[in-house]
Image (spheres, helix red, strand yellow):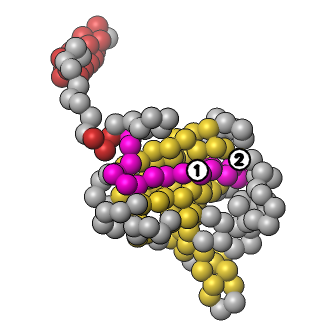
Amino acid sequence: MRKSFRLAGIAAVTILAPGLSACGTKAPAPAASETAAPGAMGPAAPEGVSVSGATVKLPAVAGRPGAAYFTITQNGGSAHKLAAVHVDGVGRAEMHETVMAGGVSKMQPVKDVAVEPGKPLVFKPGGYHVMLFDVDASLKAGGTTELTVIFDNGDKASTPAKIAGAADMPAGEGANNGGMAGMDHM
């Protein structure tokens, strides 16, 4: 018994030693694209790119997906591609697009979305949107969380996202999961 405690202690020191040696060393300065912009909660956007109006829509029923909406605007420069979205407190986020197929509105995943200079890219009900899976119960209507967009070149931009309850959708946009109830996933 005593031998197993000794072996466990040696194993723990061997595993933890490299990590402990890093304590006290100064971390490298973050890259320009990872520094916080005034008022932002995380990395700053690439030059000329802004993210605004971020809202996380909680699911109407626990365990079901929620949704995220926002607008990306690029003033000048070359086009970017939005490759992914991350939302704090969410297990998985997938970009989707609503399309009409055979007279039925369906959602389908998208790999990336072009962000063109001078043309706002709007993620909203009935168009591009982000489906949120495994939404943590700690996210509550009226609060905020951080939404981070990730571009194909690795640049990131974060912004605070308002958290809305299932019934908090503006008139005309539906109240059940961002107006997505009854839609088919492809």
Give the numbered dot on residue 54: 1
Q: Residue at x 33, y 40 (%)?
A: 34
Indicate the position of residue 132 as horizontal and vertical percent values.
58, 54
Q: Nearer the viewer, residue 54 or 14?
A: 54
Tell me which amino acid carries mark 2: Ala
Residue displayed at 25% across by 39% down: 31
Residue extent of the magenta highlight: 43-63
Q: Which part of the image, by quadrant, shows the N terminus? A: top left
Q: Amino acid at mark 1?
A: Ala
Give the mark nearer the N terminus: 2 vs 1: 1
Within 10 Å of disc 2 (Cα), the crowding (few <14, some 14-19, many 20+) is many
Of residues 38 and 31, the one nearer the viewer is: 38
**Residue 167 on image: x %, y %:** 80, 52
Q: Is residue 35 above or below residue 154?
A: above
Circle 2: element type: strand
* Residue 164 tag number: 2
Side of 79 where 22 appears, left or right? left
